[in-house]
Image: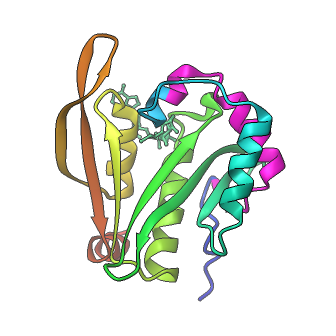
Amino acid sequence: MKTDLLHGSLVHLTVQDPETMARLFSQWSGDSEYSRLLDWDPACRFSVHSSQKWLEKDSEKQINYYFSIRTLEDDKIIGLIGLDGIQWTHGDCFVGIGLGEREFWGKGYGTDAMKIILRYAFTELNLKRVSLNVFEYNPRGVRSYEKAGFSHEGRERGLLLREGKRWDVIFMGILREEWLKQKENQ
Ligand SMILES: CC(C)(COP(=O)(O)OP(=O)(O)OC[C@H]1O[C@@H](n2cnc3c(N)ncnc32)[C@H](O)[C@@H]1OP(=O)(O)O)[C@@H](O)C(=O)NCCC(=O)NCCS
């Protein structure tokens, strides 16, 4: 019981302050590449005001499993990660992640954050599986999730239409037993 649950080797996960995150949401929504990696809704810009309203509504929920991702080096907020759609009866949930600060892409920060939230999901919430989906045109995301221990579970072919091309949506998941085995082998 000595582990600081929300601490990794590059980042830690902290509470989302609606005011700060609204400013960052609005700023990050100006990066359409980021928006198109994250979401299948048409990329658009969000004002600080609308982002704050949305975040405040979300934080009214008694329990919120969304966190800011901060670097250990200087505590800078570089993104967000959260568990959603938790089905307590079945022990299942979805995870979503986005590093809005693009200079941190490809340097291990996202994978570290994912490893932290998996530990949280399996050891604190006692969930049985974590699921996600990722777009075919996001090989960085796919590779990061493989490194965190996710397996490929299937794909919906040609679900997305972007820039005149149809792209698959890839489904990935990790089971609690797989995560435990991975820990043993480390
Ligand atoms: C997806 C995301 C969370 C991954 O986190 P990250 O910190 O960038 O990932 P990492 O640096 O740990 O790992 C990336 C891996 O992808 C690999 N990679 C990068 N670009 C690649 C490409 N074009 N093709 C194949 N692999 C690629 C890297 O080499 C690295 O693998 P390696 O460590 O084996 O060399 C982060 O990049 C992000 O938030 N991106 C923008 C938004 C987004 O895509 N959100 C996810 C939506 S599902």
Q: Which of these two is toward me, 92 or 70?
A: 92
Q: How many marks?
A: 0
Is 54 part of what is drawn in magenta? no
Residue 177, how many percent across, how many down?
27, 77
Q: Residue at x 25, y 42 (%)?
A: 170
Quadrant for the N terminus in the image: bottom right
* Secondary structure mostly taken by the magenta-highlighted segment of the chain: helix
Residue 90, how many percent across, how many down?
31, 79
Quadrant for the C terminus in the image: bottom left
**Residue 118 against residue 50 in the figure, above or below:** below
Left/right placement of residue 55 relative to residue 8 reads right
Residue 108, how many percent across, how many down?
52, 44
Let me know if residue 161 appears in the view: yes
Left/right placement of residue 173 relative to residue 68 reads left
Is 28 part of what is drawn in magenta? yes
Q: Residue at x 40, y 39 (%)?
A: 141
Q: Residue at x 71, y 66 (%)?
A: 60
Let me know if residue 71 appears in the view: no
Q: Which of these two is toward me, 79 or 17?
A: 17
> From which residue to which does the magenta span run?
11-35
Toward the right, the furthest residue is 19
> What colour scheme was applied to this rendering of the protein?
rainbow
Toward the top, the furthest residue is 164
**Residue 116 against residue 121 in the figure, above or below:** above
Q: Residue at x 72, y 29 (%)?
A: 27
Residue 165, how many percent across, how many down?
25, 15
**Residue 88 against residue 143 in the figure, above or below:** below
Where on the image, by quarter, is ligand 1?
A: top left
Left/right placement of residue 166 relative to residue 133 reads left
When asked about the image quadrant of residue 11, the answer is: bottom right
